[in-house]
């Protein structure tokens, strides 16, 4: 369990830092950044599809693994071939807005989970989620010019990365506190036999 949490923490930290870097690049080099991201994403889906197809023929453990692989492969090809269309202003705004709304719902659900676990600052994640839900709606409506939209998207992505880092730190600290409390509860009690009269 401890090892899984370490992996989760590392993955979350890397993703948050990636969001911050991507947001900065989107503001400074908007066109190159958008094209690169979509090409890399499309290539990644194609590779995933190939892996699923190969795994199906080697292991055969997933019933629809072959068709999932075919779907991912075709979807990746379509994504790469449609990069120029996807970077158009309205389509890009819709895609990012949808991602922001989905991310916001995950944050709100996660905050409710923190509340169940007794985290005192669970409401911070709720506020983050609500803010990004509103931002996602604004992006989909898209009242911006292309330049302003790129700056707005980049800023939102940077803020999202920073918020996720803050949340990760808060959760890590809370888990450390819980671990210390559990250690105190199970700490062995030392008994001095000289305090007791033992009849022979």
Image (spheres, grey):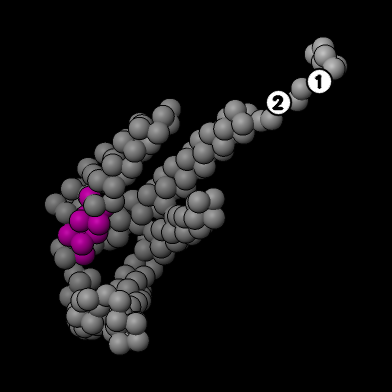
Most extreme residue toward the front is 200
- Using the rendered image of the protein, determine whether residue 146 is visible from the camera's viewpoint: yes
Q: Residue at x 30, y 87 (%)?
A: 57
Is residue 170 shown left or right of residue 200?
left
Query: In this figure, which residue is indicated by the disc labeled 1?
Result: 192
Q: Considering depth in this image, is 165 or 182 the residue closer to the camera?
A: 182
**Chief secondary structure of the magenta span?**
helix
Q: Is residue 60 above or below residue 131?
A: below
Q: Residue at x 20, y 76 (%)?
A: 64
Q: Count the marks: how many? A: 2
Question: Tag 2's secondary structure?
Answer: loop
Q: Considering depth in this image, is 51 or 65 the residue closer to the camera?
A: 65
The image shows residue 38 at horizontal and vertical percentages of: 30, 73
Q: Considering depth in this image, is 34 or 187 the residue closer to the camera?
A: 187
Q: Disc 2 versus disc 1: distance between alpha carbons?
A: 10 Å
Is residue 34 shown left or right of residue 16?
left
The image shows residue 119 at horizontal and vertical percentages of: 43, 31
Q: Residue at x 29, y 40 (%)?
A: 108
Would you say the residues marked 2 and 1 are in contact, meaning their CB atoms lie under 8 Å apart? no
- The quarter holding residue 123 reads top left
If the image is split into quadrants, where does the C terminus sit? top right
The image shows residue 52 at horizontal and vertical percentages of: 30, 80
How dense is the environment of label 2, judged by Cα within 10 Å: few (below 14), some, or many (20 and up)? Answer: few
Q: Is residue 52 magenta?
A: no
Query: In this figure, which residue is indicated by the disc labeled 2?
Result: 189
Residues in magenta? 92-101
């Amino acid at each position: 369990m401890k090892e899984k949490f370490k992996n989760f923490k590392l993955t979350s930290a890397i993703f948050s830092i990636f969001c911050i870097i991507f947001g900065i690049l989107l503001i400074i080099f908007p066109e190159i950044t958008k094209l690169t991201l979509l090409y890399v994403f499309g290539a990644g889906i194609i590779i995933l599809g190939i892996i699923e197809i190969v795994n199906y023929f080697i292991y055969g453990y997933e019933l629809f693994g072959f068709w999932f692989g075919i779907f991912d492969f075709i979807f990746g090809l379509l994504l790469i071939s449609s990069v120029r269309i996807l970077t158009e202003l309205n389509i890009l705004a819709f895609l990012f807005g949808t991602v922001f709304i989905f991310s916001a719902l995950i944050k709100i659900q996660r905050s409710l989970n923190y509340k169940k676990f007794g985290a005192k600052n669970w409401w911070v994640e709720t506020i983050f989620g609500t803010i990004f839900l509103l931002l996602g709606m604004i992006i989909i409506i898209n009242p911006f010019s292309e330049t302003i939209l790129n700056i707005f998207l980049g800023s939102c992505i940077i803020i999202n990365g920073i918020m996720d880092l803050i949340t990760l730190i808060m959760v890590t600290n809370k888990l450390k506190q819980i671990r210390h409390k559990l250690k105190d509860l199970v700490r062995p009690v030392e008994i001095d036999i000289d305090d007791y009269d033992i009849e022979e």
